Image (tube, rainbow, N blue to C red):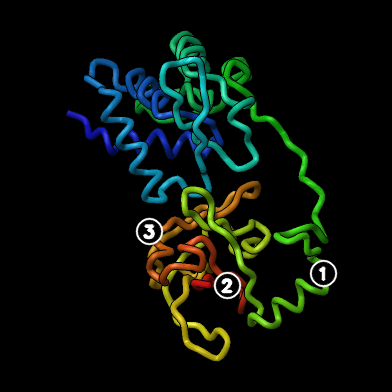
């Protein structure tokens, strides 16, 4: 009897490593293909997928609920630069599984499967890769130096710098609709492949406050994230709650770089 939780996690790791867009139903179909003969119930898989996301175990992945022509609009899991409404193909799993059966490849990344030990070998031709939906490359939007905010006030570089100085260098960031705090990839450039989060005490406006400190140092880390060059690190409410609620019913936190680390405090 296989462990559904373990098998789902294995597939999710492969999917995120290969930057695939996917739904829980896609994971179910991939598992049924991989574990031929096992009784794989979609509801069981769906619960495990949701749990991995809720526990912040998908790293920089986010999710968006869209219509795909079925009775229920599923969550599509994707990277921030991917648009699930145009980049997700609901038929990609069926297509690639059929091709995978014909040429003995991993349907997730199109690599050869070694029949002797069931490990992944060399990459095959692009036939299988092209059968799946390609990632849409979206150019970066121009960086804004000014813009309107509530009340029509223009935020100029001078105002931004003055505000930062009055706030000990912290900048306020608002959480996503799911309560996650996005840390821009520009702040994570020196961390290498992983970012480690720990709880520490820092000074803010002359007071000692609890903070989440994101750095390359794994010592006393409560969470470790993989860093991807085209995504952001997203800290879930599970960890934000450890330093208290931010302003406006927990919707914003203060963030700054200090001593090679990213510091997050409740605003």
- SS under mark 2: strand
Structural distance between the alpha carbons of marks 3 and 1: 34 Å
Image position, residue 207 (x, y; %): 50, 89
Nearer the viewer's eye, disc 1 or disc 2? 1
Q: Is residue 98 visible?
A: yes
Mark 2, residue position: 261
Q: Is residue 19 depicted above or below 229 in this figure? A: above
Task: State yes or no: discs 3 and 1 in contact (Cβ < 8 Å).
Answer: no
Q: Which mark is residue 238?
A: 3
Judge from the rendering whether residue 48 lies leftward or rightward of residue 74; answer left or right: left
Nearer the viewer's eye, disc 2 or disc 3? 3
Mark 1, residue position: 157
Q: Which mark is residue 27?
A: none
- SS under mark 3: helix
- The residue located at (49%, 23%) in the rendering is 112
- The residue located at (57%, 40%) in the rendering is 79
Image position, residue 225 (x, y; %): 48, 55
Task: State yes or no: discs 1 and 2 in contact (Cβ < 8 Å).
Answer: no
Q: Is residue 193 visible?
A: no
Sequence-earlier tag: 3 or 1: 1
- The residue located at (79%, 65%) in the rendering is 155
Q: Name the one closer to the observer, 231 or 219.
A: 231
- SS under mark 1: helix
Structural distance between the alpha carbons of marks 1 and 2: 23 Å
Q: Name the one closer to the observer, 27 or 247.
A: 247
Mark 2 burial class by Cα count in 10 Å: few <14, some 14-19, many 20+? many
Task: State yes or no: discs 2 and 3 in contact (Cβ < 8 Å).
Answer: no
Task: Tell me the quadrant of the picture where the N terminus can be found.
Answer: top left
Q: Name the one closer to the observer, 112 or 67.
A: 67
Structural distance between the alpha carbons of marks 2 and 3: 20 Å
């Amino acid at each position: 009897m296989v462990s559904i939780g373990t098998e789902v996690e294995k597939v999710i790791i492969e999917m995120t490593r290969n930057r695939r867009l996917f739904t829980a139903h896609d994971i179910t179909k991939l598992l049924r293909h991989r574990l031929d003969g096992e009784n794989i119930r979609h509801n069981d898989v769906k619960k495990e997928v949701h749990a991995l996301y809720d526990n912040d175990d998908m790293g920089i992945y986010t999710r968006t609920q869209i219509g795909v022509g079925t009775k229920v609009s599923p969550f599509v899991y994707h990277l921030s630069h991917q648009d699930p409404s145009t980049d997700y193909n609901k038929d990609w799993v069926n297509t690639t599984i059929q091709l995978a059966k014909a040429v003995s490849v991993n349907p997730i990344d199109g690599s050869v499967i070694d029949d002797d030990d069931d490990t992944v070998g060399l990459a095959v031709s692009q036939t299988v890769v092209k059968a799946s939906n390609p990632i849409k490359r979206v150019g970066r939007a121009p960086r804004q130096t000014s813009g309107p905010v509530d009340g029509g006030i223009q935020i100029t570089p001078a105002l931004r710098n003055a505000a930062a100085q009055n706030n000990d260098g912290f900048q306020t960031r608002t959480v996503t609709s799911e309560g996650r705090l996005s840390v821009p990839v520009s702040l994570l450039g020196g961390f290498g492949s992983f970012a480690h989060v720990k709880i520490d005490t820092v000074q803010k406006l002359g007071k000692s406050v609890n903070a989440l400190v994101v750095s390359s140092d794994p010592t006393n880390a409560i969470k470790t994230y993989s860093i991807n060059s085209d995504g952001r690190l997203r800290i879930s409410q599970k960890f934000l709650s450890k330093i208290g609620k931010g302003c406006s019913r927990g919707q914003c936190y203060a963030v700054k770089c200090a001593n090679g680390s990213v510091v997050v405090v409740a605003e």
